[in-house]
Image (tube, rainbow, N blue to C red):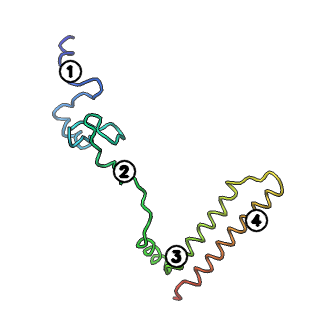
Amino acid sequence: MGEVANQVQHEFWRPPMPAASDAAASQEFVETCRRCGTEFIVSSRFCHACGATRPELNASSRVMELPGLAELSALGERLGLTTASLIAFLVGIVCIVGALTVGLVFSARTMLDWQAIQIWRIEWLLGAISAFVAGRLFKKSS
């Protein structure tokens, strides 16, 4: 029993060392630090041994990118819309989403509240209708 304890090669916070045959199979799934070779803790941004940053989890890779003009023009081409028509279409979609969320955000406790919510919905829907009409006017005639 004492012989087993003498052969332990790992520290208490690290998993046991894999056998030589398992090392090649598990190496593709294990992320290690480039500087010191220590395995990264799950979802950590830095190495717990040397403090080096994890290359895949830099702050720049987490930033959500907004579509640029090239993506919007490609969307317009797929839909068969000009740039002005596409912008009017997107404004109309935003107005429809606004009309739908008015009922989720505001609750009617009295008849006056209910009427105010309905007027806001009507205003959002009128905005959507006018945006869609403007988009239709800006569209190329095919």
- Residue 29's x, y, as percent? 27, 42
Q: Residue at x 68, y 69 (%)?
A: 125
**Disc 4 marks which amino acid?**
Ile
Q: Earlier in the sequence, mark 3 or mark 4?
A: 3
Residue beneath label 2, please? Answer: 59
- Identify the disc placed on residue 8: 1
Mark 1, Cα crowd under 10 Å, few <14 / some 14-19 / many 20+, is: few
Q: Earlier in the sequence, mark 2 or mark 4?
A: 2
**Disc 3 marks which amino acid?**
Leu
Q: Earlier in the sequence, mark 1 or mark 4?
A: 1
Q: Secondary structure at mark 3?
A: helix
- Identify the disc placed on residue 119: 4
**Disc 2 marks which amino acid?**
Ala
- Quadrant hosting residue 34: top left
- Say above or below: 135 vs 3: below
Q: Residue at x 68, y 59 (%)?
A: 102
- Say above or below: 114 vs 34: below
